[in-house]
Image: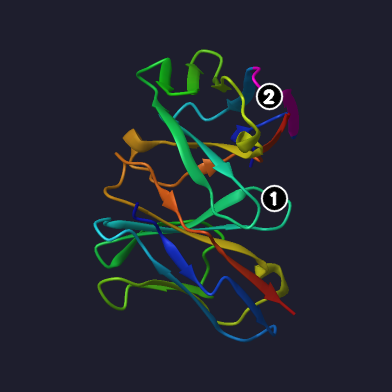
Amino acid sequence: EPEVTQTPSHQVTQMGQEVILRCVPISNHLYFYWYRQILGQKVEFLVSFYNNEISEKSEIFDDQFSVERPDGSNFTLKIRSTKLEDSAMYFCASSPQALQETQYFGPGTRLLVL
Amino acid sequence: DQQVKQNSPSLSVQEGRISILNCDYTNSMFDYFLWYKKYPAEGPTFLISISSIKDKNEDGRFTVFLNKSAKHLSLHIVPSQPGDSAVYFCAASARNFGNEKLTFGTGTRLTIIP
């Protein structure tokens, strides 16, 4: 069964450093998402992406964050200058279409900012 | 932001009995609801969904009930099995309003007692 994959599974970084989290969505899906879950809190929406542009973003997704689909398979989330409060599990999700289909999640990347 | 609430942080059920997980929402624009199951260190796994035009959807051992007037939904698992032990998240979106993002509840940890 096709699945969303994410790399790395764990990332430790120093505050102020840039990180790039990578995702390979399910191959025939067209809509891509990033969510995060801070330890002990709920899963929160960050951004949705379709047709090479952001279609929706949350208040969390400020100028420090960016997303890109650099090729036909990868979908990345970049945090330019990490802060301690960026420590969380980051989940990528994809769906065949927006508004009609379920979002399928990857296993997540655990980011720890020191 | 408590638009989706799961008031029971944990629930223990005997194997073979029915598990009932509850979820309440406040945003009347929500029109699509999903249940996800999550094991530690994994991403949320889609279980079952329901559109606001229905009041029940069934898939094998899983049934979701929606009461729009009460803004309440529930997930029934019967019979419960040890492999059902996980954290269950309720999520909602306002698809007909062009809103793709999923808003999650805080989760209920279900433990099935053998």
Farthest residue to the front: give it. B114
Question: What amino acid does circle 1 point to?
Answer: Gln
Query: Which mark's residue is nearer the viewer, 1 or 2?
Result: 2
Is B108 within the magenta? no
Residue drawn at 65 percent across, 85 percent down: A16
What residue would you read off at disc 2? B15
- The location of residue A21, given as percent across then percent down, is 50, 74
- The location of residue B21, given as percent across then percent down, is 63, 25
The residue carrying pointer 1 sits among few (fewer than 14), some (14 to 19) or many (20 or more) residues within 10 Å by Cα, namely few
Classified by dominant secondary structure, the portion drawn in magenta counts as strand
Is B12 within the magenta? yes
| Quadrant of the image containing the N terminus of chain B | top right
Q: In this picture, which residue range is highlighted in magenta?
A: B10-17
Question: What amino acid does circle 2 point to?
Answer: Glu
- The location of residue A87, given as percent across then percent down, is 68, 68
Looking at the rendered structure, whether the residues under marks 1 and 2 are on a common chain is answered as no
Residue drawn at 61 percent across, 37 percent down: B83
Quarter of the image where one finds residue A100: top left
Residue A41 - label: 1
